[in-house]
Amino acid sequence: MKQIETYHHKKILVLGLAKSGVTAAALLHKLGAFVTVNDKKPLSENPEAQGLLEEGIKVICGEHPVELLEEGFELIVKNPGIPYSNPMIVGAFEKGIPVITEVELAYEISESPFIAITGTNGKTTTTTLIHEMLNSGEKHPLIAGNIGKVASGVAEHATNENTIVIELSSFQLMGINTFNPKIAIITNLYDAHLDYHGTKKEYIDAKANITKNQTSAEFLIVNSEQQEVMEIARNSNATIVPFSTKQVLNEGAYVLDGWICFNGEKVMQISEIVLPGTHNLENILSAMAAAKLSGVENYAIQEVLRSFTGVKHRLQFVTEKDGRKFYNDSKATNILATVNALAAFQQPVILLAGGLDRGNEFDELIPYLKNVKALITFGQTAPKIERVGRDVGIKMIERVDNVEKAVPVAFQHSEPGDVILLSPACASWDQFKTFEVRGDIFIEAVHKLK
């Protein structure tokens, strides 16, 4: 870790805890800052805050008091989930107090270069693939960010022999100033998180921050099939590396005669890749491009793609039982992700779907429901998804209370050769804390089947 003096004796407010806030607060304390932590959860129910208190860090819990901003803070490190409409953040901007996320802090202390991945879908799979490819190629990667490992905690222990492969959300990218990855990737851009950002433009602008500090010495890997992604590329100073599953490109990553290729070189036959789905081919191409730019040899890329079956909760194969294959795609928190999951299968599908109602309809699913023989719904959006199912003529539609109850019902309506697929097309927050909890309950219910 770089022993920076940037925060020495500075008065800093860490707003919101969770893992990132706890790590950032402890790190800033080590860097000599005068740290105050403010979290909405009461102290008695907040073991993380209690731990920071024992380290000598000032802790204020139970509410976000706006008057706290009168204490002369020079910087706020914000939990990514706290919206910019929060009165504390609005007040900070009015007072001219800078607001960052801990990703910026991670970059400032890191001795390692970063490979950063963002986009609407495919981030976690792409991040994991790159990490595995670099690891197979003996490049000493570390994985961080929105994938579950706090970036500043990883950076604290990284050296110049490592590369940090980091998944970044739009929430995290809104809070950077100097962050500059050696390689950046934008997988794709669709409508998402508009309840947080307000408009699609603000969402895209947040994603574009991944390249705002790049120069021609750095690389931006982009989906050449998407106009909005290419617009970001046109405004970037980075060296652009496109990828495409549909066009043969003069440079970049693409498909030709059943091979994945990079800059005119055939790297591997698609028939040898075990990860299913056209959308995953996009993830593979972008990951391959990052690996090749990092000096990874073809054999290491091939080794990963012959064995990588997917990330947990992302079109994850769970098991086969009595001729039925079960897939956990709980990370499908939007319609596009479910479209991609449905497109990955040619056999009959029993689809389990539903969740948080964000106000949208589900008609975009209609062209992709042709192989769905039964629809099991749950959550707030169950009536909307059922309406779409009836519109396409699905005869077996049944509503249940939750994912756990959906599994035996789906099994009851299935036959050998069918796929039973959890791909909700919705966020999980109406019934579950996270999509991971939803996916774990699905997996447990599958294994309980008799």
Image (cartoon, rainbow, N blue to C red):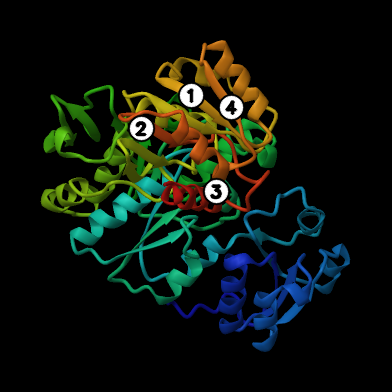
Going from N to C along the chain, the mark reached first, 2 or 3, is 2
> Which quadrant holds the N terminus?
bottom left
Verify CB contact (< 8 Å) between mark 4 and mark 1: yes
Residue 18: horizontal and vertical position, in percent?
62, 65
From the image, tell me which residue sits under label 4.
398
Going from N to C along the chain, the mark reached first, 2 or 4, is 2
Residue in the picture at 88% in, 66% down: 67
Going from N to C along the chain, the mark reached first, 4 or 1, is 1
Mark 4 lies on a secondary structure that is strand
Please state if 238 lies on the left or on the right of 39 as rendered: left
Q: Which disc, if any, is residue 374? A: 1
From the image, tell me which residue sits under label 2.
279
From the image, tell me which residue sits under label 3.
438
Measured in 3D between alpha carbons, the distance from the residue under mark 1 to the one under mark 2, in whole angstroms, is 24 Å
Q: Residue flagged by tag 1: what amino acid is it?
A: Ala
Q: Which quadrant of the view contains residue 165?
A: bottom left
Measured in 3D between alpha carbons, the distance from the residue under mark 2 to the one under mark 4, in whole angstroms, is 29 Å
Name the outermost residue toward the front.
450
Measured in 3D between alpha carbons, the distance from the residue under mark 4 to the one under mark 1, in whole angstroms, is 8 Å
Measured in 3D between alpha carbons, the distance from the residue under mark 1 to the one under mark 3, in whole angstroms, is 20 Å
Residue 374 shows in this picture: yes
Q: Residue flagged by tag 4: what amino acid is it?
A: Glu
Going from N to C along the chain, the mark reached first, 1 or 2, is 2
Residue 153: horizontal and vertical position, in percent?
48, 71
Please state if 370 lies on the left or on the right of 130 as rendered: right
- Position of residue 434 relative to residue 28, above or below, is above
Q: Which disc, if any, is residue 337? A: none
Residue in the picture at 73% in, 62% down: 97
Please state if 16 lies on the left or on the right of 248 as rendered: right
Residue 237 shows in this picture: no
